[in-house]
Amino acid sequence: MGLLLLGLLLFAGVHLVPSLAPSLKASWLGRFGEGGYKGSFSLLLLASFALMIGGWRSITPSSLYLPPDSMHLVALAIMALAFVLLVVSNRNSRLRRLVRHPQLTGVALWGLAHLLLNGDNRSVLLFGGLCVWAIVEILAINRRDGVWIKTDAPAWSAELVTLVIAALVIAVTVAVHPWLSGMPVF
């Protein structure tokens, strides 16, 4: 459990530096330059993933709660929305006028959906931890950046492209999910 927790804390800590500790980021940039900052940021994130994966695999799951079967379709719908938001985070979309932080909101929804499906100790720690991190990150960025300035809405054709991309990402994820997690989506 310790490795997984350490990985989550490293992941969250590195991501929270720009929004909660801008002086630390400035110091980091001053010392290593833009390339060194980005490189060390990336290495720390890779280390956090290695710790999370190793921690996940080292934990024998024990049940904390039993998710109801009726939540499966609800969780899948939440997951679909999460993937649309993740795609929207890299595209101009009308959804960006409704959701200030689509990527972080997508991660929070992804975590919530997994908590609706998994009640074991390692799932609660991983998915709950990432969900909490995403919410804290949203609040920290909002505090740092102040007023939300919305962009103009794109053409409807751009929205259609976004939905097609999201559908492709969902299809690929459904296909590789059993290989990644050992659990089929359906």
Image (tube, grey):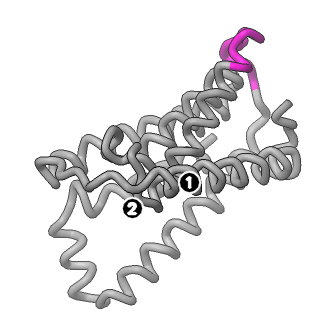
Q: Earlier in the sequence, mark 1 or mark 2?
A: 2
The residue at 57%/37% (across/down) is: 110
In the image, 130 versus 96, the foreground residue is: 96
> Which quadrant is the N terminus positioned in?
top right
Please give the label number shown on residue 31.
Answer: none
Residue 185, quarter of picture:
top right
Horizontal side, residue 51 vs residue 60: left or right: left
Total number of numbered discs in the rendering: 2
Residue 10 in view: no
The residue at 47%/56% (across/down) is: 11
Q: Residues within 10 Å of mark 1 (few under 14, many from 20)?
A: many
Horizontal side, residue 131 vs residue 67: left or right: left
> Which quadrant is the C terminus positioned in?
top right
In magenta stretch: residue 68: yes
Q: In terms of secondary structure, what is the magenta stretch mainly? A: loop
Please give the label number shown on residue 14.
Answer: 2
In the image, 88 versus 68, the foreground residue is: 88
**Residue 128 drawn at (x, y percent):** 53, 32
Residue 118 in view: yes
Q: Amino acid at mark 1?
A: Thr
The residue at 38%/88% (across/down) is: 36
In magenta stretch: residue 108: no
Q: Residues within 10 Å of mark 2 (few under 14, many from 20)?
A: some
CA separation in Å, label 1 and label 2: 29 Å
